[in-house]
Amino acid sequence: MLTFHSEETKKRQARTELYGGTLVPPFECPERVDIIIDRVRQVGLGEVRLPGTYGLEPVLAIHDARYIDFLETAWDEWVAAGLEGEPIPSIWPARRLRSDVIPDNIDGKIGYYALAAETSLSPGTFEAADTSKDIALSALDHVLHTGEPAFGLCRPPGHHAAVDQYGGYCFFNNAAIAAQCALNDGMQRVAILDIDFHHGNGTQDIFYDRDDVLFLSLHGEPNDAFPYYLGFADETGQGKGESFNVNYPLPRHTDYAAWSQALDQAIARIRAYRPELLIVSLGVDTFEKDPISFFKLKSEEFIDCGRRLKQIGLPTTFLMEGGYAVEEIGINTVNVLTGFDGD
Ligand code: OKP
Ligand code: ZN
Protein backbone atom coordinates (compact mmCIF):
# COMPACT_ATOMS: atom_id res chain seq x y z
CA MET A 1 0.00 0.00 0.00
CA LEU A 2 1.19 3.53 -0.82
CA THR A 3 1.85 6.01 2.00
CA PHE A 4 1.63 9.80 1.69
CA HIS A 5 3.89 11.66 4.09
CA SER A 6 5.53 15.07 4.50
CA GLU A 7 7.99 16.54 6.98
CA GLU A 8 5.90 19.76 6.75
CA THR A 9 3.43 18.25 9.19
CA LYS A 10 6.11 18.82 11.81
CA LYS A 11 5.70 22.59 11.46
CA ARG A 12 3.23 22.24 14.29
CA GLN A 13 5.48 22.10 17.33
CA ALA A 14 3.28 23.35 20.15
CA ARG A 15 5.04 23.42 23.51
CA THR A 16 1.99 23.12 25.73
CA GLU A 17 -1.13 21.06 26.36
CA LEU A 18 -3.42 21.85 29.27
CA TYR A 19 -3.72 18.50 31.02
CA GLY A 20 -4.81 17.83 34.59
CA GLY A 21 -4.37 21.47 35.50
CA THR A 22 -0.77 21.73 34.28
CA LEU A 23 0.88 22.58 30.98
CA VAL A 24 2.60 19.48 29.64
CA PRO A 25 4.31 18.70 26.31
CA PRO A 26 1.50 17.77 23.87
CA PHE A 27 0.58 14.09 23.55
CA GLU A 28 0.03 14.81 19.85
CA CYS A 29 3.74 15.35 19.09
CA PRO A 30 5.72 15.47 15.81
CA GLU A 31 7.69 12.31 16.71
CA ARG A 32 4.52 10.32 16.08
CA VAL A 33 4.95 10.63 12.31
CA ASP A 34 8.68 9.74 12.47
CA ILE A 35 7.93 6.50 14.27
CA ILE A 36 5.09 5.57 11.91
CA ILE A 37 7.10 6.31 8.76
CA ASP A 38 10.08 4.34 10.13
CA ARG A 39 7.82 1.35 10.61
CA VAL A 40 6.26 1.75 7.14
CA ARG A 41 9.80 1.52 5.69
CA GLN A 42 10.94 -1.24 8.04
CA VAL A 43 8.16 -3.62 7.03
CA GLY A 44 8.25 -2.54 3.36
CA LEU A 45 4.59 -1.54 3.33
CA GLY A 46 5.09 0.17 -0.04
CA GLU A 47 6.28 3.35 -1.65
CA VAL A 48 6.28 6.58 0.39
CA ARG A 49 5.27 9.66 -1.63
CA LEU A 50 5.09 13.39 -1.00
CA PRO A 51 1.61 14.95 -1.18
CA GLY A 52 0.50 17.29 -3.94
CA THR A 53 -0.85 20.75 -3.12
CA TYR A 54 -4.59 21.36 -3.27
CA GLY A 55 -4.94 24.87 -1.84
CA LEU A 56 -7.79 26.06 0.36
CA GLU A 57 -10.74 25.43 -1.98
CA PRO A 58 -11.38 21.89 -0.66
CA VAL A 59 -11.10 23.23 2.90
CA LEU A 60 -13.68 25.94 2.13
CA ALA A 61 -16.05 23.20 0.96
CA ILE A 62 -16.21 22.01 4.59
CA HIS A 63 -15.04 24.80 6.88
CA ASP A 64 -16.24 28.37 7.50
CA ALA A 65 -14.16 31.01 5.67
CA ARG A 66 -13.73 33.19 8.75
CA TYR A 67 -12.63 30.14 10.78
CA ILE A 68 -9.92 29.36 8.21
CA ASP A 69 -8.83 32.98 8.26
CA PHE A 70 -8.73 32.90 12.07
CA LEU A 71 -6.44 29.84 12.08
CA GLU A 72 -4.14 31.54 9.58
CA THR A 73 -3.76 34.74 11.58
CA ALA A 74 -4.37 33.78 15.24
CA TRP A 75 -0.73 33.32 16.22
CA ASP A 76 0.32 36.71 14.81
CA GLU A 77 -2.65 38.43 16.46
CA TRP A 78 -1.77 36.80 19.78
CA VAL A 79 1.84 37.97 19.55
CA ALA A 80 0.71 41.44 18.44
CA ALA A 81 -1.46 41.63 21.58
CA GLY A 82 1.70 41.18 23.64
CA LEU A 83 0.70 37.78 25.02
CA GLU A 84 3.57 35.46 25.83
CA GLY A 85 2.44 31.87 26.27
CA GLU A 86 0.66 29.77 23.65
CA PRO A 87 -2.96 30.64 22.79
CA ILE A 88 -5.33 28.65 25.02
CA PRO A 89 -9.00 29.63 25.36
CA SER A 90 -10.10 30.79 28.77
CA ILE A 91 -13.72 31.75 28.00
CA TRP A 92 -16.32 30.38 25.58
CA PRO A 93 -19.79 31.34 24.34
CA ALA A 94 -21.06 28.73 26.82
CA ARG A 95 -24.74 28.21 27.70
CA ARG A 96 -26.35 31.48 28.89
CA LEU A 97 -23.95 33.57 26.74
CA ARG A 98 -24.39 34.74 23.14
CA SER A 99 -22.76 32.76 20.35
CA ASP A 100 -24.01 34.90 17.46
CA VAL A 101 -21.28 37.54 17.81
CA ILE A 102 -17.58 37.08 17.07
CA PRO A 103 -15.37 39.33 19.20
CA ASP A 104 -12.57 41.39 17.65
CA ASN A 105 -10.28 40.70 20.61
CA ILE A 106 -8.00 37.71 19.96
CA ASP A 107 -8.76 36.23 23.41
CA GLY A 108 -12.47 36.32 22.60
CA LYS A 109 -11.94 34.91 19.10
CA ILE A 110 -9.99 31.96 20.45
CA GLY A 111 -12.86 31.05 22.76
CA TYR A 112 -15.34 31.45 19.91
CA TYR A 113 -13.45 29.08 17.59
CA ALA A 114 -12.17 26.52 20.14
CA LEU A 115 -14.24 23.57 21.35
CA ALA A 116 -11.74 22.52 24.02
CA ALA A 117 -8.73 23.95 25.87
CA GLU A 118 -6.07 21.25 25.56
CA THR A 119 -5.05 22.29 22.04
CA SER A 120 -2.67 25.27 22.15
CA LEU A 121 -2.14 27.22 18.94
CA SER A 122 1.43 27.78 17.74
CA PRO A 123 3.35 29.25 14.82
CA GLY A 124 3.23 26.68 12.02
CA THR A 125 -0.04 25.09 13.10
CA PHE A 126 -1.92 26.46 10.07
CA GLU A 127 0.81 25.28 7.67
CA ALA A 128 0.87 21.81 9.25
CA ALA A 129 -2.94 21.54 9.05
CA ASP A 130 -2.81 22.67 5.41
CA THR A 131 -0.25 19.94 4.63
CA SER A 132 -2.23 17.36 6.60
CA LYS A 133 -5.20 18.07 4.33
CA ASP A 134 -2.93 17.78 1.24
CA ILE A 135 -1.81 14.36 2.48
CA ALA A 136 -5.43 13.25 2.87
CA LEU A 137 -6.36 14.47 -0.61
CA SER A 138 -3.28 12.87 -2.19
CA ALA A 139 -4.17 9.53 -0.62
CA LEU A 140 -7.75 9.97 -1.83
CA ASP A 141 -6.62 10.82 -5.37
CA HIS A 142 -4.52 7.67 -5.53
CA VAL A 143 -7.47 5.55 -4.44
CA LEU A 144 -9.83 7.25 -6.90
CA HIS A 145 -7.42 6.83 -9.82
CA THR A 146 -6.22 3.27 -9.17
CA GLY A 147 -8.81 1.61 -6.94
CA GLU A 148 -5.84 0.58 -4.79
CA PRO A 149 -5.77 1.45 -1.07
CA ALA A 150 -3.62 4.28 0.28
CA PHE A 151 -2.51 5.57 3.66
CA GLY A 152 -2.44 9.31 4.36
CA LEU A 153 -0.12 9.91 7.30
CA CYS A 154 -2.01 13.03 8.35
CA ARG A 155 -0.84 15.20 11.23
CA PRO A 156 -2.44 17.09 12.88
CA PRO A 157 -5.48 14.79 12.99
CA GLY A 158 -8.92 16.01 11.91
CA HIS A 159 -11.96 14.20 13.26
CA HIS A 160 -12.77 16.58 16.14
CA ALA A 161 -12.67 19.66 13.88
CA ALA A 162 -16.16 20.97 13.08
CA VAL A 163 -17.27 23.55 10.49
CA ASP A 164 -15.94 26.44 12.57
CA GLN A 165 -14.23 24.87 15.59
CA TYR A 166 -10.86 23.35 16.44
CA GLY A 167 -9.91 21.20 19.42
CA GLY A 168 -8.87 17.71 20.43
CA TYR A 169 -5.63 18.33 18.47
CA CYS A 170 -7.65 18.86 15.23
CA PHE A 171 -7.95 21.93 12.95
CA PHE A 172 -9.09 20.84 9.48
CA ASN A 173 -11.29 17.77 9.22
CA ASN A 174 -9.19 15.73 6.79
CA ALA A 175 -11.69 12.86 6.46
CA ALA A 176 -14.60 15.22 5.79
CA ILE A 177 -12.59 17.21 3.25
CA ALA A 178 -11.63 13.99 1.46
CA ALA A 179 -15.20 12.64 1.49
CA GLN A 180 -16.54 15.88 0.01
CA CYS A 181 -13.89 15.80 -2.73
CA ALA A 182 -14.85 12.23 -3.64
CA LEU A 183 -18.50 13.32 -3.92
CA ASN A 184 -17.52 16.35 -6.02
CA ASP A 185 -15.58 13.94 -8.23
CA GLY A 186 -18.85 12.13 -9.03
CA MET A 187 -19.32 9.57 -6.29
CA GLN A 188 -22.83 9.12 -4.87
CA ARG A 189 -22.12 7.49 -1.52
CA VAL A 190 -19.05 7.56 0.74
CA ALA A 191 -18.67 5.80 4.10
CA ILE A 192 -16.40 7.15 6.85
CA LEU A 193 -15.53 4.60 9.53
CA ASP A 194 -13.89 6.20 12.56
CA ILE A 195 -11.98 3.68 14.69
CA ASP A 196 -10.04 6.22 16.75
CA PHE A 197 -10.69 5.80 20.49
CA HIS A 198 -12.41 9.20 20.60
CA HIS A 199 -15.74 10.02 19.01
CA GLY A 200 -15.40 11.86 15.69
CA ASN A 201 -17.70 14.68 16.73
CA GLY A 202 -16.57 17.01 13.95
CA THR A 203 -17.13 14.51 11.16
CA GLN A 204 -20.52 13.50 12.61
CA ASP A 205 -21.67 17.09 12.87
CA ILE A 206 -20.52 18.04 9.36
CA PHE A 207 -22.56 15.27 7.71
CA TYR A 208 -25.37 14.89 10.26
CA ASP A 209 -28.19 15.97 7.93
CA ARG A 210 -26.87 14.23 4.80
CA ASP A 211 -27.42 10.82 3.24
CA ASP A 212 -24.46 10.91 0.82
CA VAL A 213 -21.98 10.26 3.64
CA LEU A 214 -22.51 7.41 6.10
CA PHE A 215 -20.58 8.12 9.29
CA LEU A 216 -19.84 5.37 11.81
CA SER A 217 -17.73 5.73 14.97
CA LEU A 218 -16.51 3.23 17.60
CA HIS A 219 -15.37 5.09 20.70
CA GLY A 220 -15.19 5.44 24.46
CA GLU A 221 -18.66 6.19 25.79
CA PRO A 222 -19.29 9.95 26.07
CA ASN A 223 -20.27 9.67 29.72
CA ASP A 224 -16.64 8.73 30.44
CA ALA A 225 -14.50 9.96 27.52
CA PHE A 226 -13.55 13.06 25.55
CA PRO A 227 -15.32 14.80 23.78
CA TYR A 228 -18.08 13.97 26.33
CA TYR A 229 -20.92 15.94 24.74
CA LEU A 230 -21.48 13.96 21.53
CA GLY A 231 -21.22 10.33 20.41
CA PHE A 232 -24.24 8.70 22.06
CA ALA A 233 -25.99 5.78 20.37
CA ASP A 234 -29.23 7.75 19.92
CA GLU A 235 -27.53 10.21 17.52
CA THR A 236 -28.68 8.66 14.26
CA GLY A 237 -28.77 11.66 11.91
CA GLN A 238 -31.50 14.15 11.07
CA GLY A 239 -33.75 14.98 8.12
CA LYS A 240 -32.37 13.33 4.98
CA GLY A 241 -29.48 12.16 7.15
CA GLU A 242 -31.68 10.08 9.47
CA SER A 243 -30.11 6.59 9.90
CA PHE A 244 -26.85 7.66 8.19
CA ASN A 245 -25.01 8.33 11.45
CA VAL A 246 -24.11 5.35 13.61
CA ASN A 247 -22.36 5.50 16.98
CA TYR A 248 -20.95 2.55 18.90
CA PRO A 249 -20.09 3.93 22.38
CA LEU A 250 -18.13 1.34 24.38
CA PRO A 251 -17.25 1.17 28.10
CA ARG A 252 -13.94 1.39 29.92
CA HIS A 253 -11.77 -1.76 29.58
CA THR A 254 -13.33 -2.82 26.26
CA ASP A 255 -11.09 -5.54 24.78
CA TYR A 256 -10.72 -6.72 21.19
CA ALA A 257 -13.43 -9.41 21.58
CA ALA A 258 -16.05 -6.76 22.40
CA TRP A 259 -14.56 -4.04 20.17
CA SER A 260 -14.44 -6.31 17.11
CA GLN A 261 -18.11 -7.24 17.63
CA ALA A 262 -18.97 -3.57 17.28
CA LEU A 263 -16.63 -3.39 14.28
CA ASP A 264 -18.50 -6.27 12.63
CA GLN A 265 -21.81 -4.46 13.18
CA ALA A 266 -20.34 -1.33 11.62
CA ILE A 267 -19.05 -3.39 8.68
CA ALA A 268 -22.52 -4.90 8.12
CA ARG A 269 -24.03 -1.40 8.10
CA ILE A 270 -21.39 -0.19 5.61
CA ARG A 271 -22.14 -3.12 3.27
CA ALA A 272 -25.88 -2.39 3.41
CA TYR A 273 -25.17 1.24 2.40
CA ARG A 274 -23.29 0.10 -0.75
CA PRO A 275 -20.78 2.99 -0.80
CA GLU A 276 -18.28 3.49 -3.59
CA LEU A 277 -15.49 4.49 -1.21
CA LEU A 278 -14.46 3.80 2.38
CA ILE A 279 -12.49 6.37 4.36
CA VAL A 280 -11.05 5.00 7.59
CA SER A 281 -10.31 7.55 10.31
CA LEU A 282 -7.46 5.49 11.71
CA GLY A 283 -6.61 6.13 15.34
CA VAL A 284 -4.64 3.57 17.32
CA ASP A 285 -5.37 5.10 20.71
CA THR A 286 -7.57 2.03 21.31
CA PHE A 287 -4.26 0.35 22.27
CA GLU A 288 -4.03 -1.07 25.81
CA LYS A 289 -1.07 1.16 26.69
CA ASP A 290 -2.42 4.43 25.31
CA PRO A 291 -1.79 7.08 27.97
CA ILE A 292 -5.07 9.02 27.53
CA SER A 293 -7.56 6.29 26.54
CA PHE A 294 -9.18 3.22 28.12
CA PHE A 295 -9.65 0.37 25.65
CA LYS A 296 -7.49 -2.75 25.81
CA LEU A 297 -6.51 -3.63 22.23
CA LYS A 298 -3.20 -5.48 21.82
CA SER A 299 -0.68 -4.86 19.05
CA GLU A 300 -1.34 -8.15 17.14
CA GLU A 301 -5.08 -7.46 17.20
CA PHE A 302 -4.65 -4.44 14.92
CA ILE A 303 -3.65 -6.92 12.17
CA ASP A 304 -7.00 -8.68 12.50
CA CYS A 305 -8.75 -5.31 12.38
CA GLY A 306 -7.06 -4.61 9.03
CA ARG A 307 -8.12 -8.03 7.72
CA ARG A 308 -11.74 -7.36 8.60
CA LEU A 309 -11.65 -3.97 6.86
CA LYS A 310 -10.24 -5.62 3.73
CA GLN A 311 -13.20 -8.04 3.74
CA ILE A 312 -15.57 -5.16 3.03
CA GLY A 313 -14.05 -5.12 -0.44
CA LEU A 314 -14.13 -1.36 -1.10
CA PRO A 315 -11.60 1.16 -2.42
CA THR A 316 -10.19 2.37 0.89
CA THR A 317 -8.36 5.50 2.05
CA PHE A 318 -6.78 5.33 5.51
CA LEU A 319 -6.25 8.70 7.20
CA MET A 320 -4.24 8.99 10.41
CA GLU A 321 -6.04 10.32 13.47
CA GLY A 322 -4.85 9.64 17.07
CA GLY A 323 -2.54 7.28 18.96
CA TYR A 324 -0.33 8.45 21.82
CA ALA A 325 1.60 5.37 22.98
CA VAL A 326 4.40 6.77 20.86
CA GLU A 327 6.76 3.82 21.27
CA GLU A 328 4.26 1.38 19.75
CA ILE A 329 2.40 3.77 17.41
CA GLY A 330 4.36 2.58 14.35
CA ILE A 331 3.75 -1.11 15.02
CA ASN A 332 0.05 -0.63 15.76
CA THR A 333 -0.70 1.65 12.80
CA VAL A 334 1.20 -0.42 10.28
CA ASN A 335 -0.34 -3.63 11.66
CA VAL A 336 -3.76 -2.39 10.51
CA LEU A 337 -2.33 -1.63 7.06
CA THR A 338 -0.46 -4.93 6.64
CA GLY A 339 -3.54 -6.78 7.87
CA PHE A 340 -5.49 -5.00 5.12
CA ASP A 341 -2.82 -5.76 2.52
CA GLY A 342 -2.97 -9.42 3.47
CA ASP A 343 0.52 -10.43 4.54
C1 OKP B 1 -7.63 13.47 19.90
B1 OKP B 1 -7.85 12.27 18.96
C2 OKP B 1 -8.02 12.73 28.60
C3 OKP B 1 -8.02 14.13 28.01
C4 OKP B 1 -8.23 14.06 26.53
C5 OKP B 1 -8.02 15.40 24.49
C6 OKP B 1 -7.98 14.19 23.67
C7 OKP B 1 -7.95 14.47 22.19
C8 OKP B 1 -7.89 13.23 21.34
N1 OKP B 1 -8.04 12.74 30.02
N2 OKP B 1 -7.89 15.25 25.91
O1 OKP B 1 -9.16 11.82 18.86
O2 OKP B 1 -6.99 11.16 19.22
ZN1 ZN C 1 -8.32 9.78 19.63
Image (tube, rainbow, N blue to C red):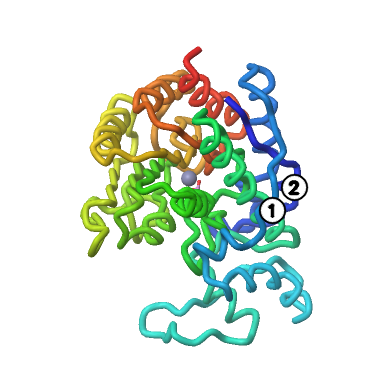
Callouts 2 and 1 close, C-beta under 8 Å: yes
Q: Mark 1 Cα within 10 Å, few/some/many (few <14, many 20+)? A: many
Is the residue 298 above or below the residue 88 in the image? above
- Percent from the top left, x then y, of residue 236? 24, 54
- SS class, disc 2: helix
Q: Amino acid at mark 1?
A: Ala
Find disc 2 in the rendering and name its residue.
Answer: 8
- Percent from the top left, x then y, of residue 240? 24, 61
Residue 340 left/right relative to 249: right
Residue 130 left/right relative to 302: right
- SS class, disc 1: helix
Label drawn at residue 128: 1
Give whichever of discs 2 and 1 has the lower sequence position: 2
- Percent from the top left, x then y, of residue 47? 67, 25
- Percent from the top left, x then y, of residue 105? 64, 85
Q: Amino acid at mark 2?
A: Glu
The CA distance from mark 2 to mark 1 is 6 Å
Q: Quadrant of the N terminus?
A: top right
Is the residue 89 above or below the residue 208 in the image? below
Is the residue 270 above or below the residue 127 in the image? above
Any atom of ligand 1 within 8 Å of the CB at mark 1? no
- Which residue is drawn at the image coordinates 49% and 87% (left, top)? 101
Residue 262 left/right relative to 34: left
Between residue 298 and residue 261, name the one nearer to us: 261
- Which residue is drawn at the image coordinates 61% and 38% (left, top)? 153
Task: Answer with the quarter of the image where residue 141 lies.
Answer: top right
Between residue 275 and residue 208, name the one nearer to us: 275
Between residue 110 and residue 9, name the one nearer to us: 9
